[in-house]
Amino acid sequence: MARLIVMRKGGGGKVAVNPELVTHVRSAAGAFTDIFFEGHQVAVEGTFEEVVARLAAPERKPGGAQERREEEGERRQDGAGLVFGRLNR
């Protein structure tokens, strides 16, 4: 399944980009950056560094935080993940 990143287009609107298809990125005038893919050029809002960081970010999976905790040996015994207690007064 393709991983899409939603970005704001220069001039208004939004665009969803598959970072695997981006061929190169170029800084543009103002606070915009041009991205190129399959013969298309799209100006998106953000500095060059911000856009490159978003395109290069690792893929997020649902439940990723839980999987990382389990990989690090942190496991919860209760199924809901919440603990309620009473204060003794």
Image (cartoon, grey):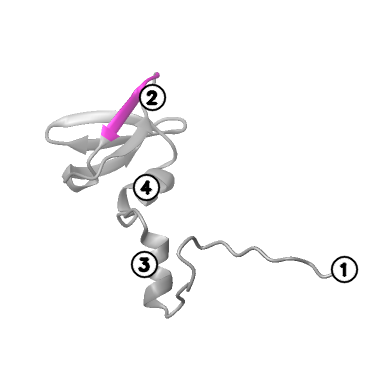
Q: Residue at x 42, y 48 (%)?
A: 49
Q: Are marks 3 and 2 in contact (CB under 8 Å)?
A: no
Cα distance in 3D space between marks 3 and 2 = 37 Å
Type of the residue with mark 4: Arg
Q: Name the residue under label 3.
A: 67
In the rendered structure, the answer to whether residue 69 lies left or right of residue 34 reads right
In the structure shown, which secondary structural element does the residue marked by tag 4 occupy?
helix
Specify which label sits upstream in the sequence, 4 or 1: 4
Q: Name the residue under label 2.
A: 10
Looking at the image, residue 9 lies above or below residue 54: above
Which of 12/61 is in front? 61
Type of the residue with mark 2: Gly
Q: Which residue is drawn at 31% across and 53% down?
A: 56
Which of 46/6 is in front? 6
Specify which label sits upstream in the sequence, 1 or 3: 3
Specify which label sits upstream in the sequence, 3 or 2: 2
Q: Residue at x 49, y 68 (%)?
A: 78
Question: Which stretch appears magenta?
Answer: 12-16
Q: Name the residue under label 4.
A: 54
User: x, y percentage for residue 62?
Assistant: 34, 53
In the structure shown, which secondary structural element does the residue marked by tag 2 occupy?
loop
Cα distance in 3D space between marks 1 and 2 = 60 Å
- Label drawn at residue 89: 1
How many other residues sit within 10 Å of disc 2, few (<14), some (14-19) or many (≥20)? Answer: some
